[in-house]
Image: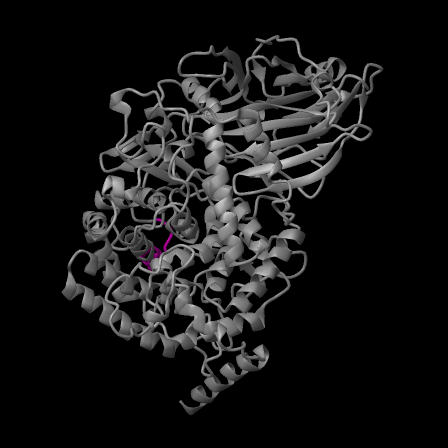
């Protein structure tokens, strides 16, 4: 039985009307990858006050209007179409009442009512997150469903311009309209505008916009269409509430008699109004897609390779993919809603309504930095370091994002790490530490054969080892996506040739479970590790030599500058060594496992003497920087990797993610000494409460700016009370910040909560906001249990200034004695 189309759509949109309470400055509209990445700016105001924007802040032509023929009135809904309508005796320009925006992890809804009538309009943007369907996640396309309700006739209009296909407004573009017919494999005939640059520049960007590829906007075949000069087309709709099904075939520049590409749909609600309610409901759906082939070039083991999109393995043409995507809405919406609802439940239970909204707001932004490539047998996820410098597959950008992947689908983390492992195993990188990135600028992963990538050796080695063990633990524990595993009844089957069928997905594009594929448990973890074991050993060897007392170098917070003896960086390296002891154990290297563990134990004892203040109230920024302090966010990895499990396992019951019968990793007999003592967790939890500012927890004592990803790493391993306070302050920042771009991770914790001089935006590192959720799933649900001691005592009252001055004074006494 098919899913009922209109009721399913209506339920999806209307169920979200009260789903979010925060008011961020910018909201996602169509966000699928680094180039199909469009947002609603100034989202606390009306959507017709500004044009929608690309993630960089550059505007794009994207207009949505409504027209009511009875009153001869046209209403801009999204974008500044009113600037083109002028004054006319044929129509009046008015504005609806904007009821506001709501959002979940995959959906943004904009709701309007028409004053003086019973008309209600919802624009529902869906960029579906489908954790149990990697195939669907790879489709570079999103949906806009327009819902109408009322008793008066109304027409809706949507257009886009050439700014969607190039960042250079001087470029010339070409376009066409393609009609599809109903066939056995396609249920809904559609028509599609396809727009491309006249002369594409393969694998090239202009101010971060792609200069190759084709933008598509699709609609049902029964809607009206028209292309032409922007003033003419928009005024034509305003006057007639319809379009004329004409195609302007005079190709030209993006702003040369600005060509736009429009659809309109008329709804005869007056003829269909229900007798009891007096109103009728209807909808129309549009889709937006960006097709590119290749998506990147990558220095793989076989050499520099043009990498095709994953979807190209399943469809012979782009229009086949567009048709499938359009017809697949029911299933995509079902999977996305399931993810959003489960995330909302988990985040609310882990934090609050505010945390639920922050996690939902972050999800599409993380995946908006990714391109899914590879083959059906071996998918690969590529990632762009959006906004900060555009690096390709940056290790210390994947690291803050990885809690999102651990929670959403740990297999996606494996797909992210694979390009880094393959490239370095092939011998193309000369250094003995982990590389920083695969290429200076996305989409070109040409490597660093000269070894002169950004110098963060301890950072990158520690990041890789921590993420590697996190994935190993997920495989051992069978930590699969906690979301619906089967497509709904009536889902659209993939019509592919036998050669294109994948051992990883079923006939409906759903990922097989790890049990189905035999990729879970100790043996699967060992297989994954063995292939790249020499790299893990090589990187650990570097950490053994260099992590206890780090030389002058950068850490992931490179904007803060070079610094020697960084306390937090050293901790990451030491935890990396400890992680290697578990990785070695996984492949049966028991002697090496013991040796790495002993080194890590020795180093962590020495680290406490070097890195903590004399009065043990806080961690210093650097070993010899007395009177300083730092957010010790790398301690999160100690808990996440099961190094701080509760001593009394028998007291544990089941968690929200695991049954009571699930055993933790390793030997559970007797009490295990935590790797990092309880006192350090308690010390930092108390300190964070003492230094908390208006909009959150500063990164360290040098500045009042913060990094939101590290705030959540740090808050995840504090007491519930301190976590709640930090979360409340961050939520206040989301509501009040003066930043005007997709969610930044670097902001001032005082003043107007704005940018601190560096404008980070739309970065995938907001995956770190999932730290609470990743921790709760780790170690069979026991990682969080191991931190319950933090809730047994009230936070200590600390005089921050006095503690810092005492640290300085004690050092002066020591110096004097010398």
In the displayed structure image, the side of residue 260 where residue 86 appears, left or right: right
Q: Is residue 456 magenta?
A: yes
- Up/down of 745 relative to 207, above or below: below
Q: Is residue 106 magenta?
A: no
Q: Is residue 724 visible?
A: yes
Q: x, y percentage for residue 713?
A: 46, 60
* Residue 301 in which image quadrant: top left
Quadrant where the N terminus sits is: top left
Q: x, y percentage for residue 227?
A: 61, 13
Q: x, y percentage for residue 387?
A: 51, 44
Q: Which is nearer the eye, 229 or 781?
A: 781
**Residue at the spot x=36%, y=21% of the render?**
315
Q: Residue furthest front?
A: 276
Q: x, y percentage for residue 215?
A: 50, 23
Start-end of magenta stretch = 453-463
**Residue at the spot x=19%, y=64% of the render?**
593
* Residue 380 in which image quadrant: top left
Majority SS type along the magenta span = helix
**Residue at the spot x=24%, y=71% of the render?**
669
In the displayed structure image, the side of residue 588 where residue 762 appears, left or right: right
* Residue 722 in which image quadrant: bottom right
**Residue at the spot x=53%, y=44% of the render?**
762
Q: Residue furthest bottom?
A: 817
Total count of labels: 0
Quadrant where the C terminus sits is: bottom left
Q: Which is nearer the eye, 245 or 630?
A: 245
- Up/down of 632 relative to 793, above or below: above
Q: Is residue 560 visible?
A: no
- Up/down of 259 relative to 629, above or below: above
Colour scheme shown: one colour
């Amino acid at each position: 039985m098919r899913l009922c189309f209109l009721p399913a759509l209506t339920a999806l949109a209307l169920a979200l009307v009260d789903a979010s309470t925060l008011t961020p400055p910018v909201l996602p509209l169509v966000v699928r990858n680094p180039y199909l990445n469009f947002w609603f700016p100034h989202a606390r105001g009306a959507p017709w006050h500004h044009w929608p924007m690309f993630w960089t802040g550059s505007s794009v032509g994207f207009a949505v209007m409504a027209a009511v023929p009875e009153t001869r009135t046209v209403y801009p809904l999204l974008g500044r179409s009113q600037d083109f309508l002028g004054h006319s005796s044929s129509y009046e320009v008015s504005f609806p009442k904007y009821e506001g925006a709501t959002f979940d992890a995959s959906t943004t809804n904009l709701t309007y009512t028409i004053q003086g009538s019973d008309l209600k309009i919802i624009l529902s943007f869906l960029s579906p997150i489908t954790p149990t369907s990697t195939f669907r996640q790879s489709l570079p396309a999103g949906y806009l469903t327009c819902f109408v309700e009322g008793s008066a006739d109304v027409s809706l209009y949507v257009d886009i311009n050439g700014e969607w296909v190039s960042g250079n407004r001087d470029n010339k573009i070409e376009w066409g309209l393609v009609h599809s017919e109903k066939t056995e494999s396609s249920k809904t005939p559609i028509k599609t505008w396809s727009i491309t640059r006249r002369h594409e520049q393969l694998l090239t960007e202009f101010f971060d916009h792609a200069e190759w590829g084709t933008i598509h906007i699709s609609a049902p075949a029964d809607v009206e269409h028209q292309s032409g000069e922007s003033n003419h087309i928009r005024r034509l709709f305003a006057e007639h509430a319809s379009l004329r099904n004409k195609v302007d075939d005079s190709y030209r520049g993006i702003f040369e008699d600005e060509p736009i590409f429009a659809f309109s749909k008329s709804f005869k609600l007056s003829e269909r109004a229900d007798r009891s309610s007096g109103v009728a409901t209807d909808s129309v759906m549009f889709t937006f897609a960006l097709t590119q082939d290749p998506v990147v070039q990558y220095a793989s083991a076989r050499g520099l390779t043009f990498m095709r999109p994953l979807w190209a393995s399943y469809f012979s043409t782009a229009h086949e993919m567009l048709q499938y995507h359009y017809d697949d809405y029911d299933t995509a919406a079902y999977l996305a809603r399931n993810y959003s609802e489960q995330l909302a439940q988990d985040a609310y239970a882990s934090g609050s309504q505010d945390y639920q909204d922050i996690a939902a707001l972050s999800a599409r932004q993380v995946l908006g930095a990714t391109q899914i490539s590879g083959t059906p047998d071996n998918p690969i996820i590529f990632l762009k370091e959006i906004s900060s410098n555009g690096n390709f597959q940056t290790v210390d950008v994947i690291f803050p994002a990885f809690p999102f992947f651990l929670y959403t689908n740990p297999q996606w983390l494996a797909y992210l790490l694979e390009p880094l492992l393959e490239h370095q195993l092939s011998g193309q990188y000369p250094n003995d530490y982990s590389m920083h990135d695969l290429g200076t600028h996305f989409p070109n992963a040409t490597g660093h054969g000269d070894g002169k990538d950004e110098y963060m050796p301890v950072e990158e080695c520690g990041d890789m080892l921590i993420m590697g063990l996190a994935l190993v633990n997920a495989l051992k524990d069978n930590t699969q996506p906690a979301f619906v595993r089967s497509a709904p009844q009536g889902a659209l089957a993939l019509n592919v040739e036998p050669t294109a069928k994948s051992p990883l997905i079923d006939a409906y594009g759903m990922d097989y479970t790890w049990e189905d594929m035999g990729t879970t448990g100790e043996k699967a973890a060992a297989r994954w590790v063995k292939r790249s074991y020499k790299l893990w050993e090589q990187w650990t060897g570097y950490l053994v030599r260099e992590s206890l007392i780090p030389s002058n170098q950068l850490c992931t917070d490179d904007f803060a500058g070079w610094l020697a003896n960084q306390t937090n960086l050293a901790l990451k390296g030491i935890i990396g060594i400890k992680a290697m002891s578990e990785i070695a154990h996984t492949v049966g290297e028991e002697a090496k496992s013991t040796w790495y563990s002993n080194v890590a134990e020795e180093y962590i004892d020495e680290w406490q003497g070097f890195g903590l203040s004399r009065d043990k109230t806080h961690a210093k920024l650097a070993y010899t920087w007395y009177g300083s302090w730092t957010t010790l966010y790398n301690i999160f990895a100690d808990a996440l990797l099961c190094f701080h499990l509760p001593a009394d396992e028998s007291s544990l019951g089941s968690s929200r993610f695991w049954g009571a019968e699930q055993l933790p990793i390793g030997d559970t007999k007797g009490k295990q000494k935590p790797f990092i003592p309880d006192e350090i967790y308690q010390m930092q939890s108390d300190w964070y409460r003492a230094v908390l500012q208006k909009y959150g927890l500063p990164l360290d004592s040098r500045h009042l700016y913060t990094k939101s990803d590290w705030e959540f790493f740090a808050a995840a391993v504090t007491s519930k009370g301190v976590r709640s306070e930090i979360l409340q302050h961050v939520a206040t920042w989301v509501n009040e910040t003066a930043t005007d771009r997709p969610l930044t991770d670097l902001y001032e914790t005082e003043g107007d909560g704005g940018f601190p001089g560096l404008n980070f935006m739309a970065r995938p590192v907001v995956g770190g906001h999932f730290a609470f959720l990743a921790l709760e799933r780790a170690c069979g649900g026991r990682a969080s249990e191991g931190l319950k001691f933090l809730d047994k005592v009230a936070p200590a009252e600390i005089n921050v200034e006095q503690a810092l001055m005492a640290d300085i004074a004690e050092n002066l006494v020591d110096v004097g004695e010398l």
